[in-house]
Amino acid sequence: MVDKKTSNLKRFRTIATVVLIFGAIGSLYFMFKAGRSQKSILLIASFTAWVLSPFGGLFLAAKTSYLRIVPAPGSLYWLMIILATGSLVAYSGMLTSSGTKGAFIFLVAPFTSWVVIAIIFLVSKRHSTGNKGADKEINR
């Protein structure tokens, strides 16, 4: 019999992955729409790689989560959903003030995503190693 918790976690991973993919596609759509008058292929390629980088990093983390690199896979899946949704909101221009340059959000949002990813991974790693130490103390 399949463990219900494992089954729910797999379903959650699938949902988070689908949301992440739609977030990446939507982010590219908004980026290409904002840069439609740009003639430099190198600049477009650079922005494409930069905008997709957090999505790729989260996708890779989700695919390798079975290796226990990620101590709390549930928090990773929530992070995938929140960052994909947040990126779409940021890139859509809903939160951008009128004086902001078009490329600014496409530079800042991926950087902010990477900072949030690093913080969540470090906190979850520290939290998981802290719990192991507490478990060892209890078992003594």
Image: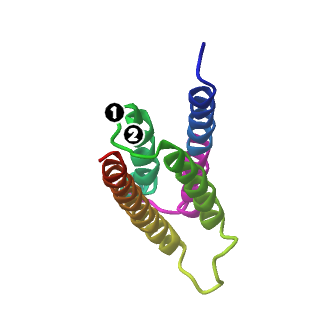
- Tag 2's secondary structure? helix
Residue 17 picture location, percent across and down: 56, 38
Residue 32 picture location, percent across and down: 55, 55
- Judged by its main secondary structure, the magenta piece is helix
- Tag 1's secondary structure? helix
Span highlighted in magenta in the image: 21-42
Q: Nearer the viewer, residue 34 or 133?
A: 133
Asked whether residue 36 is drawn in magenta, I would say yes
Q: Residue pushed farthest front? A: 140
Checking the image for residue 67, the label placed there is 1
Nearer to us: label 1 or label 2: 1
Q: Which residue is mark 2?
A: 60
Asked whether residue 64 is drawn in magenta, I would say no
Residue at image coords 45%, 39%: 62
Q: Amino acid at mark 1?
A: Leu
Q: Quadrant of residue 33?
A: bottom right
Q: Residue pushed farthest right? A: 94
